[in-house]
Amino acid sequence: RSVSTEWFQPLGVGSAAYVQPRQQISQEPRTVYLGDQAVGEFSIRRTEMELGVGLQGRLGDLRLAWLQSDLTVTPNVGLTQIAPSQTRLQGLRLRGLYDQLDDPDFPRSGSVLSVEAFAARTPSSDESRYQRWGVEGATALSRGDHTLRLSARWDFINAGTDSLADVLG
């Protein structure tokens, strides 16, 4: 479950540059596995606030933003002896988006590629070493009435801490 709001404001008429404040609140379950065995389920509550600037063009979007994320992890099933964990991350996020899909919901042709990096900038804490990189892409191919959509995602997380909220969030 998630609720978010975003305001996209160009810096002038016909300008490719913009500012973008965003806020999001979400809660989702996350199952933790040890090998092939599910050992517990946790509830992840995330509150994010972001203020970004960017450039938008006909091929896509490039955005740099300051992000603050508050994570609360609570055990629901199994591993209930683990105490709830709270973490606040603050840092910079850089995102590049190449988007040439003909329709974002039901594409019949085109491709999309998103590259994102986040580096925590929380002073004097273990969370200051947290880094995340990700690449996600999809392509749609159609022939007659049939469409094939292929997608892939790769993420790398360097948590720099043993906090459960950092590892699960």
Image (cartoon, grey):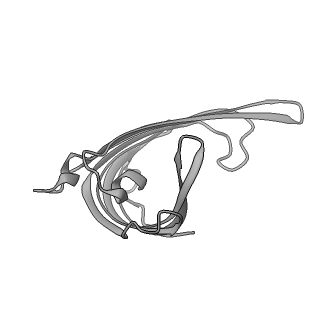
Q: Can the viewer see residue 60?
A: yes
- Give coordinates of residue 91: x percent, y percent: 24, 53
Q: Residue furthest left?
A: 124
- Give coordinates of residue 149: x percent, y percent: 72, 35
Left/right placement of residue 106 relative to residue 144 reads: left
Left/right placement of residue 2 relative to residue 91 reads: right
Quarter of the figure that contains the N terminus: bottom right
In the image, residue 21 above or below residue 116: below
Give the quarter of the image for residue 131.
top left
Q: Residue furthest front?
A: 81
- Which sits in the foreground, 57 or 94? 94
Q: Can the viewer see residue 19?
A: no
Give the quarter of the image for residue 103.
top right
Left/right placement of residue 35 relative to residue 48 reads: right
Give the quarter of the image for residue 153.
top right
Q: Residue at x 55, y 63 (%)?
A: 29
Tally of numbered tags: 0
In the image, residue 10 above or below residue 95: below
Q: Residue at x 29, y 64 (%)?
A: 87
Quarter of the figure that contains the C terminus: bottom left
- Give coordinates of residue 118: x percent, y percent: 31, 46
- Which sits in the foreground, 86 or 105? 86
Q: Residue at x 86, y 34 (%)?
A: 146
In the image, residue 31 above or below residue 100: below
Q: Residue at x 69, y 50 (%)?
A: 105
Q: Residue furthest right?
A: 145
- Which sits in the foreground, 121 or 12? 121
- Give coordinates of residue 72: x percent, y percent: 38, 68
